Every structure is written in structure tokens, then in C-alpha cells.
Image (spheres, rainbow, N blue to C red):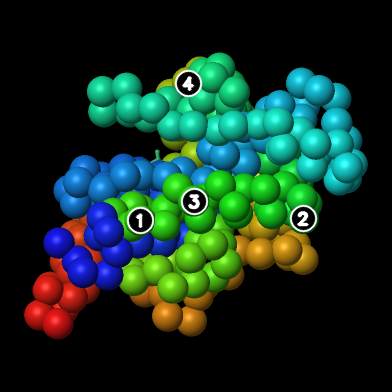
Amino acid sequence: MSAVRENGVIVAIDGPSGAGKSSLTKLLAQRLGYIHIDTGAMFRAVALMSKRAGIATDDDARLAELCRGLEVTFVRDGENCRVLANGEDVSTEIRTEEIGLLTSAISARKPVREALLTMQRAMGAKGGVILEGRDIGTVVFPDAEVKFFLSASAEERGRRRYLELAARGDKATLEETIAKVIQRDQQDEGREHAPLKQADDALPIDSTSLSIEEVLTVMENAVRERLAQDDKR
Ligand SMILES: Nc1ncnc2c1ncn2[C@@H]1O[C@H](COP(=O)(O)OP(=O)(O)O)[C@@H](O)[C@H]1O
Ligand SMILES: Nc1ccn([C@H]2C[C@H](O)[C@@H](COP(=O)(O)OP(=O)(O)O)O2)c(=O)n1
């Protein structure tokens, strides 16, 4: 085990929507025996609760109040992980495209970012974790031992999302889905607070023409190399 932190290293995985972060984080966490923290799910839970409470996306005072009273937790359910907001299982409800776009807007607000930043740092500090999101390597854990920036062309990411939606019986077209992916990229990259950006010391991986297994191999090798270096010290 790494001498760096109590439970191992911190692995940061950032990148745009549909790049493969969730799939790869889950698989890599299984291979390494690490904990998986899906920070997008935390922002999605805030967005869902704000929608239910009828809070406008720019009402920072009410968003701050909402975050103060919100606890987001992850519980393991066999191979999967359930997302609980104040104890309620919201795993399915947070995954719609509508909540995705709302989340992109809500996550640009400073009080929301500040509240979740504190939670994420507390969850990851001991190491032995993989956090995935948009600003993990740049803001949440700039000192993470291993950082990846996962990307793929907007067309390929849109195609992957479209296949997922079609499998769920959603009638969205491929063109609409690609357009939404591009809209979300622009919102996430263009915002003032913690925009989506590759950390200078992140390993970039373009998965456009790589399989999930191929990406996993690159990532696992990079983490194991780092762990081996720590063991030699
Ligand atoms: N390298 C890849 N090749 C083909 N499909 C992929 C690849 N990576 C991810 N996918 C698929 O693309 C979809 C989106 O991946 P996901 O992990 O949810 O991305 P993100 O978390 O970055 O939004 C999923 O259906 C996943 O199975
Ligand atoms: N660390 C993070 C994670 C997600 N977000 C925002 C930006 C994204 O548009 C939304 C939803 O993120 P999520 O990772 O769940 O979305 P995808 O699965 O990539 O489509 O949340 C963020 O601002 N910072």
C-alpha cells in the first residue's frame, strides 16, 4: 500500500459528459479495491432537491440554505452504488437529461460549489479513493497523486449517450443528444467557478476510438506505476 495517505493514493478523473468517467471509475475502483466517489451525482442531488423546492437557478441564498440542510451519501448495492439525499434513494431520479442540464446550471453557483467542495474533501482525504467530476484535479484535490483527463469527440460522446437513452426507451434523436452534450460542455467550460479544465499534471486520454477495456488498462497501469514508486521510497 502507498505510504502517501492512510488508505492509499487519491485518483482524480475529470472530463466532459460521456467521456467514460463513471464507467471507468467504477471498474478501476473494483480493480484497486478503492472507494468510488461520483461528484456529479452529488451535484445532481442538489439540482433535484432545488427543483422540488422551486428554487431559481440563480437564487444563491436559497441554494446555500438547501446545501446546508442536505446530506448526500453513497451506499453500496451489490455491484452498484445508490445515491441518497437526506436518506432518500434518488439514484434513478437524478439521471434524466433534464436534471443533467439543470445540474450544469446549478453547479456553476458559488455556494453550491463551496458546500460540495467541503464534503468531497472530507470524503477523500484518507486516500484509497477515486473521485470523478470536472474539477477534481484542479480544485478539489490539486495534490491528488494520479490525475486523468478523459475525453472523446462530442459526436462520439453524444452517440454513447444516445445509445443509453434509446436503451431506456427515450425518444431523443442522435442530433439532439449531440447538441445537448455540446451545450453542457460549453456551460461547464465557460463558467466562472471551477470550470471544466485539464490539470497541467493530468494524463490526457482520448477514448474516441478506444474500448472501455483499453482505457481501463492505461489507467490501471498508471496508478500501479505510481503505487510501485511510493513503495520503493
Ligand atoms: N471507451 C468507450 N468506448 C465505448 N463506449 C464507452 C466508452 N467509455 C464509456 N462508454 C459508454 O459511454 C456511455 C457514457 O459513459 P459514462 O461512463 O457514463 O461517461 P461520463 O461519466 O463521463 O458521463 C456509457 O454507456 C458507457 O458504457
Ligand atoms: N465535480 C463536478 C461534477 C459535476 N459537475 C456538474 C457539471 C455537469 O454538467 C453536471 C453533471 O455531472 P455528471 O458527471 O453527473 O454528468 P455526466 O455523467 O458526465 O453526464 O454536474 C461539476 O460541476 N463538477
Q: Of the residues tagged 4 and 3, which is closer to the observer?
A: 3
Residue 126's mark?
1
Residue behind mark 3 = 122
Alpha carbons under labels 4 and 2: distance apart:
34 Å
Residue 205 at least partly seen = no
Residue behind mark 2 = 110
Q: Name the residue type under label 1.
A: Lys
| SS label for mark 3 | helix
Alpha carbons under labels 1 and 2: distance apart:
26 Å
Alpha carbons under labels 3 and 2: distance apart:
19 Å
Among the two numbered marks 1 and 2 on one chain, the one whose residue lies closer to the N terminus: 2
Alpha carbons under labels 3 and 1: distance apart:
8 Å
Where in the figure is residue 112, as x and y percent of width and height?
Answer: 72, 47
Among the two numbered marks 4 and 3 on one chain, the one whose residue lies closer to the N terminus: 3
Q: Name the residue type under label 4.
A: Arg
Q: Residues within 10 Å of mark 4 (few under 14, many from 20)?
A: few
Q: Quadrant of residue 134?
A: bottom right
Residue behind mark 4 = 168
Where in the figure is residue 15, as x and y percent of width and height?
Answer: 50, 60
